[in-house]
Amino acid sequence: MNRVKNRILHYLLARQQRVARNEAFERAAEAGILERDYIGENERSGTKWRISDDCVLDFKGDEDHDFELITKFMKRSSCRTHLSEIVIEAEMSSEFCEDINSEEADHMGALDTPTSTSLANSDVMQRAPSGGGIACQQDHVLSLVKRLTPSLKPAEVTTALSLAKAIDLESGMFEQLMSAMEKSNPIIMVQVPVFDFVRQFGLMLEDGLILPFFVSLSPIESEPSLSGHYNELIDARRRKSIACMNGKFARQKDFDDELRKSISKNVLTQIKPVIIADEEKSHLPDRILAVSDITLKGDGIDLELIADVLSICCNIPKVDSLSMMTKKDFNPSHLGIDDMAVAIRPGRSLARIVDTLIMLEADNALAFDDTNDADSSVGSSYLNGLGNSIKPSRPNKYVGFYDVIEPCNLACEEAGSSSCKNHLFVEGLSGYGDAQQWALDLKQDLDAWHSDEVDWSELSTRLLLSGPPGTGKTTYAKALCNSLQIPLISTSVARWLEASHLGDVLAAISATFKYANAISPCILFIDEIDNIGSRNGGASGGANSGNGHKNDDYWASLINRLLELLDGAAKTDGIVILGATNRPEKIDPALLRSGRLEKHIIIPPPDAEALIGIIAHHLGTDLDAIVKEGSEASKGLIVRSMNDLPDRTHTNSAINNACSNIHVTNSTIHKNADAGHRTTRNGATHD
């Protein structure tokens, strides 16, 4: 990272960090720890903070004691108010140039410590004189509150990095920007080909995170502003008004004289600065470029930018992020700022963040490919020009034919969080027999494959599960997802058939396998696979019975496509195929051949031992109370339910047997419950 980009980024991150600190002070005020005093008549003139009179005596001067006390008070307060501005507002261009060229920016530290900026130049606070006393205590408390400053937001950090890169891409751009900012009413063009950049850029302008003041964006003509608002913001904050235009609307006027009139009447006549923002990579109209005093052009999201965001927001070393993403051969060519916000969440591990980004990239790529296919009539040059900007005119029409389930967070599971207590794992399933052992073997083999000890072709990764309805085939798939720690793509033949028309059904099947290939390693679970039919007699309900039915070609086409895709998946590393059916005899024999669903395991209804495991899991912490009341309650229930039986001898015998079995079952249930909460099995058919 060179000097110019470093200086710009430090300035932008310093503004974000100041807002984050202000949020911590606001929360402390809501908790009754701090009180604010306005420097002037109201908050627009600046604010200074002091310890609340009610809390002065609570603080002992001991760092650990006082920090624990502050944390306790702030946890009690759930109120999250809008941030109050602490700094005194500055004039537009002079303050911007002073901030960006400050001595602090010239001598900033490394990127890995962007949040270590001092409050000395950014916040108006009471400072402790050298004599100590109350002022020293205030400094002590304020420093402890600062430790509770929330992490910076990934969307805002991504936007800041994109802007810094745009300014740094062309030599001399920084000097040109400074020169343009010194004009009274500059026209500035910003083009960064990343989805959601324009909206995020507009919001950050309004929140004072780009320029050293709050902004009120005034949309040109009747179009919405960059942030999506149709009217200028009017609130208690002092805001500078800036006119704005979205490049998307400028392109819509490029084919007639509307743009020429708009530039002449609505841009050149402005008596305020104008910002034009665009998030597509295709060429903007020449007239827009000509009227701009300066044009900033950026790039899309790449591995370096992602690693920087993780370093700033999550304190994850860049070398670790780059190493993992490179190992996974990750190419983030379709990610947007919204995707970064979705994936980078508090408490998530690096592995989960990267896997989520890969999944989102694959989803965006599918949508982009679908748009290319559907909109080829508008010209390939325009679509190719979109580049890294994923902004399809319509969503991928086949996304709804499968669901993607992420594995549970093992860190949460190991910590014993209450939100994780019902997660299913193959290791704790009851009554699955050979299916359980197959999964455990696969887990071990998968670890060896990750370590490059074995080839994917050596693993058993194709399984057909069959059994009566409700015996836990879907439950098994979810448990396998958690045990293997890879995503689960869940679909069914019935969902594919919702498309109805043959071409759409074939496309839905292909899209599912294509997505699995894009996010591998993963599990592809196909439920009700018998509904695909058989070319030798019977498509579920006999649609192709082998007697020359008029729809035989339809079902044969579906089976052939599925066979083709299964063969292709067999040649692709990282895809585990799991099929489920209630009627294995209806499946085309070709689907069960080697390399396809070659392993077949039957799951029978749960026996008594399996039922005990099911009961222990579902009772959970209620087990003790239910066991305590079980004997008497069950005995009374049996008496009432069997009271009308004619054979009283048989009735009494049944009651005695049931009650004696309760005592045996109680001890066995406790034994299974002590083995851990992971023991489970879906007993839907035995309720």
Image: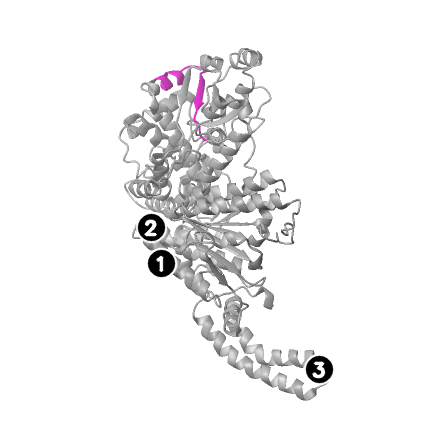
The extreme bottom residue here reads 649
Residue 53 sits above or below residue 687 on the image: above
Disc 2 element:
loop
Give the distance between the C-alpha atoms of the residues marked 3 and 2, in whole angstroms.
65 Å
Instruction: Quickly name the residue at label 3.
Output: 643
Q: Inspect this view and state whether residue 46 appears.
A: yes
Q: Position of residue 379 (x, y in %)?
A: 52, 22
Q: Position of residue 384 (x, y in %)?
A: 46, 25
Q: Inspect this view and state whether residue 42 appears.
A: no
Disc 3 element:
loop
Give the distance between the C-alpha atoms of the residues marked 1 and 3, in whole angstroms.
54 Å
Q: Earlier in the sequence, mark 1 or mark 2?
A: 1
Q: Which residue is at 35% across, 58% downward?
A: 444
Q: How many marks?
A: 3
Q: Confirm whether the magenta stretch covers residue 183.
A: yes
* CB within 8 Å, label 1 to label 2: no
10 Å crowding of disc 2: few (<14), some (14-19), many (20+): few
Can you tell which mark lies on residue 455?
2
Q: Confirm whether the magenta stretch covers residue 508.
A: no
Can you tell which mark lies on residue 646?
none
Q: Earlier in the sequence, mark 1 or mark 3?
A: 1
Q: Amino acid at mark 3?
A: Asn
Disc 1 element:
helix
Instruction: Quickly name the residue at label 1.
Output: 444
Look at discs 3 and 2 and give the one toward the viewer.
2
- How is the protein colored in the picture? one colour
Magenta-highlighted residues:
176-194
Q: Position of residue 103 (x, y in %)?
A: 28, 27
Q: Amino acid at mark 2?
A: Asp
Depth order, front residue of 293/33? 293
